[in-house]
Amino acid sequence: MKYDLTSVGIHMNLQYECITTTINSKGEKNSAAFAFIYLGDYKVMCRIFEGSKSLKNIQETKQYVVNITQDPLIFTLSTIDKLSDEYYTDDEDIAILKDAGAYLVIDVDEIEMKTPEDFPIKNDTNIYFITGTIKDFIVKDKTAQAFNRGFSGLIESLVNCSRYKIVDGEKKKYYKDRLEENKRIIEKVSDENTKKAMDILAKEYEKY
């Protein structure tokens, strides 16, 4: 079966923020907010830091679920490890969010550890690159769309633009620094339209 991920706004080689759910051999379910990248065909990739429950479960079961949602409460509770069992379906052998508009079941192909030397980051924790194959793709809500965080960066920069025009000194530097950081993120994770929009906005900043 050919999966059309564009139906939920997912395009190849771009990064999307979703909720990753896993289950261990004891049937204990876990959720976490992780980005994932669609590599094309049936392949996806995500990066998870050492020490997380998600990584341990994936290493044990060689499977995880990518849940597509934009629910702010689910993102928050998943990030602080407080998502209760009531959020999951009743399936006993897989962890799926009840309210996910769509989800992908991923079978893990390879788990590769990268040290900070291999993948420069500002801490000493190893990071694991996990590649997998899409086993199933279910769309429950045809309006569901995966979230690309570059869009948030663009919206923040648009809001800051009006403020940038009327402040000076340290505040002006703060907004310009935020612009540069958001532009960096967009160049890394976003589509061409978002990149083009940020380039237009950056030129607007240069006028003041």
Image (cartoon, rainbow, N blue to C red):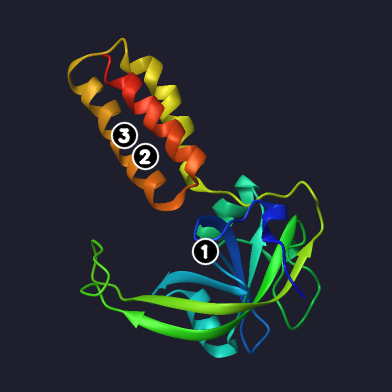
Q: Amino acid at mark 2?
A: Asn
Q: Secondary structure under badge 2?
A: helix
Q: Which residue is mark 1?
A: 36
Left or right of residue 186: residue 66: right
Marks 3 and 1, how far apart at CA: 24 Å
Q: Which residue is mark 2?
A: 182
**Residue 36 x, y percent position in the rendering:** 52, 64
Marks 2 and 3, how far apart at CA: 6 Å
Quadrant, the N terminus: bottom right
Q: Could you tell me if the residues under marks 2 and 3 are in contact, i.e. CB atoms within 8 Å?
A: yes
Residue at 72% x, 68% y: name it: 3
Q: Amino acid at mark 1?
A: Phe
Quadrant, the C terminus: top left
Q: Decide which of tag 2 and tag 1 comes sooner along the chain.
A: 1
Residue at 31% x, 41% y: name it: 181
For the image, the number of numbered tags is 3
Query: In the image shown, does 70 or 75 lie closer to the viewer?
Result: 70
**Residue 184, numbered label:** none
Residue at 48% x, 86% y: name it: 110
Q: Is residue 119 above or below residue 145?
A: below
**Residue 15 x, y percent position in the rendering:** 49, 57
Q: Quadrant of residue 174?
A: top left
**Residue 153 x, y percent position in the rendering:** 44, 38
Q: Which residue is mark 3?
A: 178
Q: Secondary structure under badge 3?
A: helix
**Residue 195 x, y percent position in the rendering:** 43, 39
Q: Secondary structure under badge 1?
A: strand
